[in-house]
Image (tube, coloured by chain):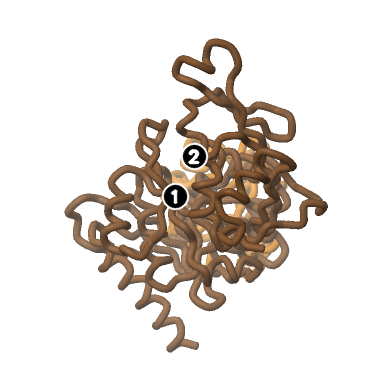
Chain colours: A brown, B orange
Amino acid sequence: MKIGELGVSGSVDQLENAGLTLAVPPFVFRIRTRYRDVAWALTVAYENFDLADPNCLVDFELELRPVVGLRRFIRPLMNLEIDGYTPFDPLPANQVFPLLEWGMNWCVTSTAHHWVMCHSAVLARGDLAVILPAPPGSGKSTLCAALMLSGWRLLSDEMALIDPVSFLVNPFVRPVSLKNSSIKVISTQYPEAKITQKVHDTIKGTVAHLQPTIDSVNSSFRAAKPRWLIFPKYEDGVSLSLSPVLKAESMVDLAGNTFNMAALGPKAFHVLSNLVEQCDCYRLNYSDLGAAIGVFDTLFKNSESIG
Amino acid sequence: MTLLRIRSPWILGFFSDGGAVVYNPFSGELHAINSTLSEILGRLSSGSVDPETALINPVSMDLSCEIDSIDHQELAEILDYLKNRLGILESVTN
């Protein structure tokens, strides 16, 4: 059954009782909470995701619960508990869904060291992937959302999970986290996009989550071969430019965006250097989303003509 | 003939576009080497390093290179860069 078929009332029932078991390949999360905002957001952002068998092996147990005491009445706060631990400071109760999303990211980046994990968006056409590593504020998520809504398959908005044996990127399809002005940009240019309610005044400003396309969700088990490594940078009013980058420089930048470089050491070096070697590496400066998407489509068409 | 020894545990990785990186798995330091220096290192390390396989089996530990075809000024600059900028040079012996 899909989350969308379960609906808000069904989601509330599961969230408040045994827990809603959400399959986000390759992981399974069990979520418990009495905050109904979570059910509303889940049915938008995860509408096409499967519920996992409640008796299956769950990777991460998450519970969002209110902070007790006076905080229940004055500016209420809530905590996220992950497998019995509370890794984050409490946040205002209206930020419950962003906190859940950040917590799910944390679950993976702090434990899944059998992959090399880079902070980047990943999209694919067919089985060829483009990796977009970038620090916050570079326009990565906006570009990622626009590419996904223009026919590219989303593998992740947040992290590349690179298999250390095959060097393929595993999908970890999740909603795209849109921040501040990018929410309006995407909702205006793509009116069919399904986006959760805006949450204001978070640590990242105003946040909303964009539902992944059905094609992306249905391809959640289809790994892709890294073909392009592109470092995007949004700058207001800048002319579009796509400049080749030396592989050594790309390697340093990619390693700087790798969550578990220190944990994996030489293994990560081995994987990243091979990935860089097999990719064409570029730096992309853009201000116009449509023009930027044209660059990606051209790269893909050229790769098809090369064969 | 000069023998150049890379300090353990630095690892060298060469790329097909002529560039290279040096990596210290203990400290996590990673530096790009420009294509000129990379080419020279590749030349220095011929016999010790096969650039085709250097990425699969990165050069590590006691890499010794014979220096025999670089002018003294260029050599001095390279050695200074390796020793003082990157800190990866263990020793140079004549």
Instruction: Give the residue displayed 68% in from the left and 53% down from the top.
Output: A115
Instruction: Give the residue displayed 35% in from the left and 78% down from the top.
Output: A298
Residue B31 percent coordinates (x, y): 51, 46
Q: CA distance from mark 1 to mark 2?
A: 8 Å
Rate crowding at label 1 as few (under 14), some (14 to 19) or many (20 or more) other CA atoms within 10 Å: many
Mark toward the start of the polypeptide (1 vs 2)? 2
Instruction: Give the residue displayed 63% in from the left and 39% down from the top.
Output: B90
Quarter of the rendering occupied by the N terminus of chain A: bottom right
Badge 1 amino acid = His
Residue A152 percent coordinates (x, y): 45, 71
Q: Is residue A121 left or right of residue A161?
A: left
Q: Which residue is mark 2?
A: A98
Badge 2 amino acid = Pro
Image position of B91 with respect to A6: above or below: above
A70 vs A218, nearest the viewer: A70
Q: Which residue is mark 1?
A: A209
B26 vs A26, nearest the viewer: A26
Task: Chain letter for mark 1, please.
Answer: A
Q: Are marks 1 and 2 in contact (CB under 8 Å)?
A: yes
Residue A274 percent coordinates (x, y): 61, 63
Query: Label for residue A219?
Result: none
Name the element at disc 1: strand
Residue A179 percent coordinates (x, y): 36, 44
Task: Chain letter for mark 2, please.
Answer: A
A191 vs B45, nearest the viewer: A191
